[in-house]
Structures are given as C-alpha cells and as structure tokens.
Amino acid sequence: MNPQALDLKVLLPILVLLAAAGAAWAIIAAKPQTVQQSAEPNIPKVNVVRAEPQSLRLNVMSQGVVAPRETIDLVSEVGGKVAQVHPAMVAGGFFAANELLLTIDPRDYDYAIVAAEAQLAEAQRVLINEQAQVEQAHSEWQALGEGEPTALALRKPQLAEAQAKLKAAEADLAKAKLNRSRCELRSPFAGRVLSKQAGLGQYVPSGAVVARIYASDIAEIRLPISTEQLAFLELPLGQNAKTGRWPAVTLSAELAGKPQRWQGRIVRSEAALDDNSGQLYLVAQVAEPFRETSDRPPLLSGLFVQAEIEGVRRDGLFTLPRTALNGLQQAKLVDAEQRLEIRQLQVLRHDAERVIVKAGLNPGDRVVVSELPVPVAGMKVNAVEAQPEAAQ
C-alpha cells in the first residue's frame, strides 16, 4: 500500500473530529447567557388620611311634618240663617285676629233684647213702688204699732221679691245681648281657613260647625329622637323647662324643585316617651311660617321636612370616612415603616357619610381609607395621602 494513501486515511477522521469539536465549541460560546433576577414582592398601594383632633358640634338629625300651632272648629253658638260671609271664608283664605268671618241673622235676637228691656223697666217700676210701700209701712208702724214689727208688716219679703225680679230682668237682658253678640262669629287669632261647612243663606243650628280654621302665626313640627340621641343635646327636660334654653333647629325640604331651609327653635318636649317606638318627641316652632322672602318660601302645613337640631360641642374628636372602619369598629393604620397595623377604635356615633371616633387614634395617625382585599397586620404597603374630599 502506498504510504501516502495510508496517512490520508488516518488524518481525515481526525480532521473531521476536530472540525466537529470546533463547531460545537462555537455554538456553546455563542449561546446567550441567562441573567438571574431576584423576585420582588408585590407591595399594595393604599390611600391614607391624617387623623387630626377636632372640636365638633354634634347635631342631631330628625324629621317631621309641619302642622299649625292650633287648629279649631268655628262653631255657631246660636241658630239662624247665615246673613253675611267674609270673602276670606274659603279653603285657604287668610284672616286677621278678631276679624268678622260670618254673621247670623240677628233680628230675632234684637227682638229678644227689646223684650228684655221692657221686662227690666217693669221690674224697676215694681221695685220703686215696693220701696215706697215699705217706707209707708215703717212710718205707720212707728205711729200706730206696738212692740217689734214683723218682717211681713214692714213688707220686707215683698221688697226682696221685687229686688230679685229686677236682678232676673237684668240677667235676661244681659243674656239677650250675649246671644245677639254671638250672631257675629269672629276669629280668635290670625289664621287661615282649612275648610268651610256653611254658606250664605244656609240655616245653621246652635252648635253647628261652620268652618275649620288654624293659626298662621306659628308652625309646629313634632320631631322624634331616640334616647341615645339625648346624649348629644342640651335639653331642659326637668322642672327648669320653662326657663331653660332650648336648642335651635334648621328645617329643610325640597319645594318647587329647589332645596329650601327654614330656621326655628325647639320650644318643649312632650310629656312621655312614645309607647310604640320608645322615642321622645320634641316640638319645634317656626315664627311667621307664611312670610315669604327672597330666600325663604312659605312653610306650608303638611310639608314633610328634615330637621337638624343644634347639638353639644365636644373637643378631641376624630372624623373618618365610613370606609375606614370594618364591621368590628377596627381601622387599618400605616406606621412609620410603611407596615400595616389593625387597631380597635371607640366610635362615638355614625353619621350619613362619616364616623366620629372618640378614642383609639393619635394626632397624625395615617388611616387607610381605600379597599384592601386581605389586610394582614405587619404587611408592607405603599401609603399615599389622599385629600379629605377624595377620602369622603
């Protein structure tokens, strides 16, 4: 065999292996290197507000229906035909105090006065005549009689009878004049007509209701409050109720498509708690409810209103949004190390949009007001301070 051919057979496999090894090394060298990254924890972001103590007036909310100070039936005390009716004697009409609203035909009662005057004149004549006879009997007894005269001899019984008849005649005349005055039905106060039951020309018997009227000088609203709410009000409920200071009240309602407000004052409380609800009713009054101004419409009877009663003022209280507390009255706080703390608070009361806390917070505490799905004490959070409006 040719030595040269033998060398080629030996070298060729070696060259192939070397080429394959070089290609493999090149592939390994060109492989991208994997960079190891450390896993960072997912830190939740929460909104917080600063807890600052405040001095708050703890007003009490209630509601009620506006009613007149007084509502009465206007009743005819004498019978007769209606002779005159005031133009205001219609449902909704206004009238002044002591204004003549309705007149009963007075002719029968005028005749009764004339007859009573005649009886009085006759009684006066009889009395004068009897007094003259008494004087005559006394003179005759002094001239002719002996001993003590009897009362009959001096005509004392006859004189007493004449005097009594004169008084009866005077009483009959006074009664006739009283009945005549009752033909005129006048308003006992300034007010408004609620309904009318008698018209012109109609005969009304004695004791008949001719109209139902109510006073328009003051409106009243019965406001129920719970016994727990009494802690937020300064009410003179004892014997000093007449001289004590009652709180102011602001009434509000939707009227004519706009929110309206009226100012009033609590004037008294009712005598006992309500048997059904266990609540105490306070009575608020608004003066001149039908007086209309540019910023206040008339306060109509029967209107349902919301009431905000002036409460006591307390210092060192904290206010938080309702979302800041859970059902167990616990709040989530963020400490200086951005870790979560769950703390029990003492709540004074819940309002419509806020919670008033009396203990459990310190000035400057950061309270979480946003949702946190699974809060765990000690967990790391990213706290972002929210504006009070945004927190609410």
Image: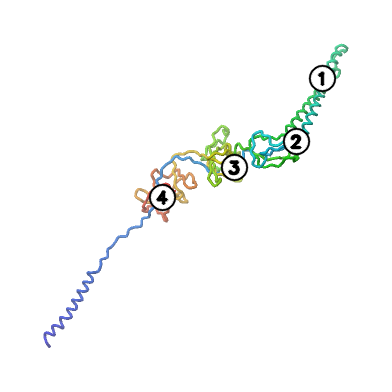
> Does residue 293 appear left or right of residue 158 in this picture?
left
Q: Compute the Cα span from label 2 to label 1.
A: 37 Å
Query: Where residue 227 appears, x then y in whole percent?
Result: 55, 42
Dot 1 or dot 3: first in sequence order is: 1
Q: Tell me which amino acid carries mark 1.
A: Ile
The residue identified by callout 1 is 128
> Does residue 199 appear left or right of residue 38 in this picture?
right
Q: Tell me which amino acid carries mark 3.
A: Leu
Indicate which label's residue lies in the foreground, 4 or 2.
2
Dot 2 or dot 3: first in sequence order is: 2
Q: Hey, which residue is sitting farthest right in the picture? A: 144
Q: Compute the Cα span from label 3 to label 4.
A: 46 Å
Q: Compute the Cα span from label 1 to label 4.
A: 103 Å
Helix, strand or loop at mark 2: loop
Q: Name the mark on residue 105.
A: 2
Seen in the picture, residue 116 relative to 286 is either above or below; the reply is above
Q: Compute the Cα span from label 1 to label 3.
A: 64 Å
> Around disc 2, counting alpha carbons within 10 Å, would you say few (fewer than 14), some (14 to 19), or many (20 or more)?
some
Residue drawn at (13%, 83%), measured in percent from left and top? 7
Q: Name the mark on residue 368.
A: 4
Query: Where residue 371 appears, x then y in whole percent?
Result: 42, 53
